[in-house]
Amino acid sequence: METSNIVVVGAGTMGNGIAQTAAVSGYQVTMIDVDPQALERGKAAIARSVEKLAAKGTLSEAQQQAALAIATAPDLDPASQADLVIEAATEDPALKLKIFADLDRLSPATACLASNTSSISITRIGAATRRPEQVVGMHFFNPVPLMKLLEVVRGLATSDSTTALAVEVGRRMGKEPVEAKDSPGFISNRILCPMINEAIFALQEGIGTAESIDTVMKLGMNHPIGPLALADLIGLDVVLFVMQVLQHDLGEDKYRPAPLLQRMVDAGRLGRKSGRGFYTYPA
């Protein structure tokens, strides 16, 4: 089935980035969020992003206008016309399961349902629907318009055709799709978040300052951004959630979240989105 109409659920950083990338790739896009202010912020973020990309010559005028023309809605009703729905809501298992149950009820029987989850089981999400063979993980990376990787995650029941559709859509969006097994954290966060967690342990134990830890990883390991600055970009609450999933599902102490990470989240120091994490950011 040809995919032309994509609905993105969630207007946050990931959601608006996915919506923008889909729109400039020629898809008809609707972005959904129950919070009207989130929709306004999402549209504003898209406008800023495409303006910068157009100024650099990486987007045409037609692509810029396509992104600015993204439709918005405060409920899931547009899913009734979707070929593909990509969920990018808050990383909350109960919320995602409810969204997928509702999407299953509302969307056409032929539609595929994808989740941008960074760690929640696609098999579990698919089981909330009557079409688990049409449920797949499409894990994009922040900032979505710039990052080339797309992690395509197959649940236990995900069909070959659904996986192929996710790969095809990803490639049309300019991404490099990589298939991953439905295992806690998939490939990316199984490796990345424990590294970040270890950097937080190093900071907690006074082995180095945040700046020195990040500098070692940038200059010594050729990482473009240090692990603590990356944690701030991802969101410390997201890092904590992934570590909790890894520890719970894999049952190994090496995945225990650093106590400092838990304290930072408890204090509301979530990184860039809250203005303060391991570093301080302007409002």
Image (cartoon, rainbow, N blue to C red):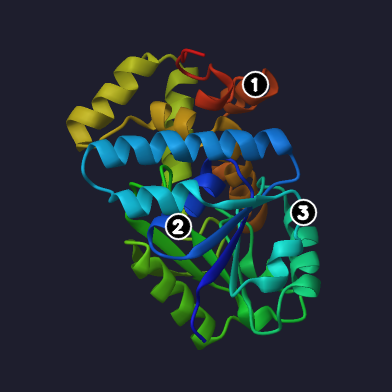
Query: Which label is found at residue 123?
Result: none
How far from the left and from the top, in percent, is residue 161? 50, 87
Q: Amino acid at mark 3?
A: Asp
How far from the left and from the top, in percent, is residue 99? 76, 59
Q: Which residue is drawn at the image coordinates 77% and 54% (left, top)? A: 75
Q: Residues within 10 Å of mark 3 (few under 14, many from 20)?
A: few
The residue singled out by tag 3 in the image is: 75
Q: Residues within 10 Å of mark 1 (few under 14, many from 20)?
A: few
Residue 131: in sight, yes or no? yes
The residue singled out by tag 2 in the image is: 23
Q: Is residue 281 above or below residue 28?
A: above
Q: Amino acid at mark 2?
A: Ala
In the displayed structure image, the side of residue 124 where residue 208 appears, left or right:
left
The residue singled out by tag 1 in the image is: 263
Q: Which residue is drawn at the image coordinates 56% and 48% (left, top)? A: 15
Residue 182: in sight, yes or no? no
Q: Which residue is drawn at the image coordinates 31% and 32% (left, top)? A: 225
Please name whichever residue, 224 or 100, is drawn nearer the observer in this view of the structure: 100
Q: Amino acid at mark 1?
A: Arg
Instruction: State the SS at label 3.
Output: loop
Tell me the distance, in whole angstroms, between the alpha carbons under discs 1 and 2: 39 Å
The nearer-to-camera label among 1 and 2 is 2
Upstream in sequence: badge 3 or badge 2: 2
Tell me the distance, in whole angstroms, between the alpha carbons under discs 3 and 1: 35 Å
Upstream in sequence: badge 3 or badge 1: 3
Instruction: State the SS at label 2.
Output: helix
In the displayed structure image, the side of residue 136 where residue 50 appears, left or right:
left
